[in-house]
Image (spheres, helix red, strand yellow):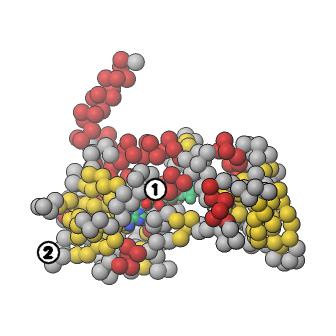
Amino acid sequence: MARELYDVTIIGGGPAGLYASFYSGLRGMKTKIIEYQNTLGGKVNVYPEKMIWDVGGQPPITGEKFIHQLIEQGLTFNPTVVHGEKIMTIKQTDDDLFILNDSSGVEHFSKTVIVAVGSGILKPQKLKVKDADRYEVSNLNYTVQSLERFQNKTVMISGGGNSAIDWANELEPIAKKVFVTCRKDHLSGHEAQVDQLMNSNATCLFNSCIANLVPCPDRQMIEYVEVLNQNTNEVEQVAVDEVIVNHGYEMDAELLQNSELNLDMVDDYFLDGNAMSETSVPGVYAAGDILKHDGKLNLIAGAFQDAANAVNQAKQFISPDANGQAMVSSHNDVFNERNAKIKQQMLQT
Ligand SMILES: Cc1cc2nc3c(=O)[nH]c(=O)nc-3n(C[C@H](O)[C@H](O)[C@H](O)COP(=O)(O)OP(=O)(O)OC[C@H]3O[C@@H](n4cnc5c(N)ncnc54)[C@H](O)[C@@H]3O)c2cc1C
């Protein structure tokens, strides 16, 4: 089969990858996105019912609606989308093209690459307690797919980071009672969220962890959680309806470790880049959670800026005379026809 060459291939279809796809279309680049999951949206799929408040100009919106908007925008210029394939390696040819090998053995050819793999393939860190996996089909949760499930329930959340705090704050007003068990003597999250939680009716059990899950008589569900206080060695039994575990994600670093490129890394996982989204390999750019640089903003808003910078760099890598930045969208010819249509619709309503 003849190889089809793309200007840019984006690995990862989360917020960074989808915005990069929009922006590269805006810059007239032939674009492909390759996503391991069968759905786009990245990590936001972990929190479809959480309200997102901190994307500029965007009123509070659920994760699910936000994903729809991201996808609609990301596919504006009809990029090629490959679902359900994991990119295993990236290599560079003698004529300075990139070949990306996917898990089915297919090779993808590209002039530039944008790595937007976030925290890699999402694998939640499991609760390391005897028989925990048995309750994954009943009341042990690693994600919150529906708030309704927790309404008027007693919920034990294990974890002291941003995700655990976010879920505790989301669930506290609707649950009967929220407990948070945290190994440290403090919560490690954004100040406002920590303050909100500490001033709520949720009970935070510090210096403690889940030591044991006690099942109902039929052994199908967790009835009690045994919480161990690591300072006193006392064990408290808490009756629960649901348990949520937020111990972070295992980071799948295979792609960058297996690739035959001299990519500089941070902490053996992240790409050590700069504020222009460049990596140590010309032609390979990065955006979103995978990229570290001095001005990094670890939010969706930061992923968007990285993505636009990555695309602008990729454009100049291919065409050194191209502008360093795209024009603002209202001045961009590619939108003329679409703007006219939208204005016509506005006049008709
Ligand atoms: C519970 C929770 C709540 C959050 N709330 C907020 C919030 O309110 N506001 C905010 O701004 N941010 C929030 N965040 C952070 C935000 O979700 C991330 O910053 C954002 O998703 C990063 O986008 P990304 O595209 O870089 O990575 P991701 O969203 O992680 O997407 C990366 C994609 O790459 C794919 N991928 C990985 N490896 C490969 C491979 N080898 N081949 C093919 N595909 C691959 C993955 O499957 C994934 O779909 C929250 C995060 C969590 C966990």
Can residue 189 be seen in the rendering of this structure? Answer: no
Which residue is nearer to you in this view: 173 or 265?
A: 173
Label 2 or label 1, whichever lies nearer to me, is 1
Can residue 63 be seen in the rendering of this structure? Answer: yes
Task: Check the image and name the residue furthest to the left.
Answer: 2
Q: Amino acid at mark 2?
A: Asp
The residue under label 2 is 95
Crowd class of label 2 (few under 14; some 14 to 19; many from 20; radius 10 Å):
few
Look at the numbered disc 1 and say if its residue's Cβ is closer than 8 Å to ligand 1: yes
In 3D space, how far apart are the residues under numbered discs 2 and 1 (Cα atoms)?
33 Å
Q: Residue at x 27, y 45 (%)?
A: 77
Q: Amino acid at mark 1?
A: Gly
Residue 328 appears left or right of 135:
left
The image shows a total of numbered marks equal to 2
Crowd class of label 1 (few under 14; some 14 to 19; many from 20; radius 10 Å):
many
Residue 189: image quadrant is bottom right
Task: Check the image and name the residue furthest to the top.
Answer: 348
Look at the numbered disc 2 and say if its residue's Cβ is closer than 8 Å to ligand 1: no
Residue 342: image quadrant is top left
Which residue is nearer to you in this view: 166 or 181?
A: 181
Q: Position of residue 276 (x, y in %)?
A: 37, 66
- Checking the image for residue 42, the label placed there is 1
Q: Position of residue 75 (x, y in %)?
A: 32, 46
Q: Position of residue 106 (x, y in %)?
A: 24, 65
Q: Residue at x 25, y 55 (%)?
A: 31
- Checking the image for residue 22, the label placed there is none
Question: Element under label 1?
Answer: helix
